[in-house]
Amino acid sequence: MPVIVVSPLSRIAEMAVRHRCREMVSLLAKEQNFHRPAVIDATRHLLLGMNDISFAGNAGLVAPGEDHVQQIIEFARQWDRSAPLLIHCWMGVSRSPAAAAIAALAVEPDQDEMELARRLRLASAYVTPNSRLIEIGDQLLSRNGRLVAAIKAIGRGADADGNTPFVFSPLPEPAVHAG
């Protein structure tokens, strides 16, 4: 089963090697420097420059936009799912969990948003997905407000130290049939 590994920047090399990732999405401030782990194919690394803010208009900061989210959707749809997809931001709490939810719906659009949000919360008590990314993803994926409502329903995550990666299934759990 394919998985998405969500990580803070400080642990991307470790997570990439441990989970044998070959593809990565980076959501970082525009000028933030870092080294792409060598196990990540350079042609399968999506780098998106944005700040972790929920509204445009902050002087000098880049708010997540439609182009960013469209690139996440397209990248996820091209993911071959033979190896985990690594998604990271600075702390692995806001931008990357939002991108993971968007990617999950991009690759498996027939799933229930509330079940997806519950899976995300079960994977990490700390996630507080960036509301702007979620709103744009909801719109671009034609979720009609269901993704926004589901993420709001799981609420704000616990306080985090930014050092807690997690693994998240982009697919709904298979139904268990008795007998």
Image (cartoon, rainbow, N blue to C red):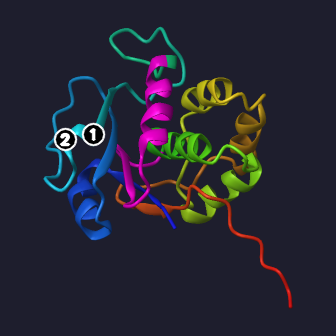
Residue 70 in percent (x, y) is at 49, 25
Q: Quadrant of residue 31?
A: top left
The foreground one among 144 and 156 is 144
The foreground one among 110 and 32 is 110
Is-magenta flag for residue 90? yes
Residue at 57% over, 47% down: 104
Residue at 44% over, 62% down: 166
- The quarter of the picture where the C terminus appears is bottom right
Q: Quadrant of residue 61?
A: top left
Q: Is residue 24 left or right of residue 147?
A: left
Is-magenta flag for residue 173? no
| Figure check: 67 above or below 1 | above
Residue at 60% over, 24% down: 136
| Figure check: 101 above or below 69 | below
Residue 37 in percent (x, y) is at 17, 52
Q: Quadrant of residue 71?
A: top left
Within 10 Å of disc 2 (Cα), the crowding (few <14, some 14-19, many 20+) is few
Label 2's element? helix
Within 10 Å of disc 1 (Cα), the crowding (few <14, some 14-19, many 20+) is some
| Figure check: 121 above or below 155 | below
Callout 1 touching callout 2 (CB < 8 Å): yes
Which residue is at the far right?
179
Check disc 1 and give the amino acid type: His
Check disc 2 and give the amino acid type: Ala
Q: Is residue 9 left or right of residue 169?
A: left
Magenta highlight range: 67-93
Residue bearing mark 2: 42
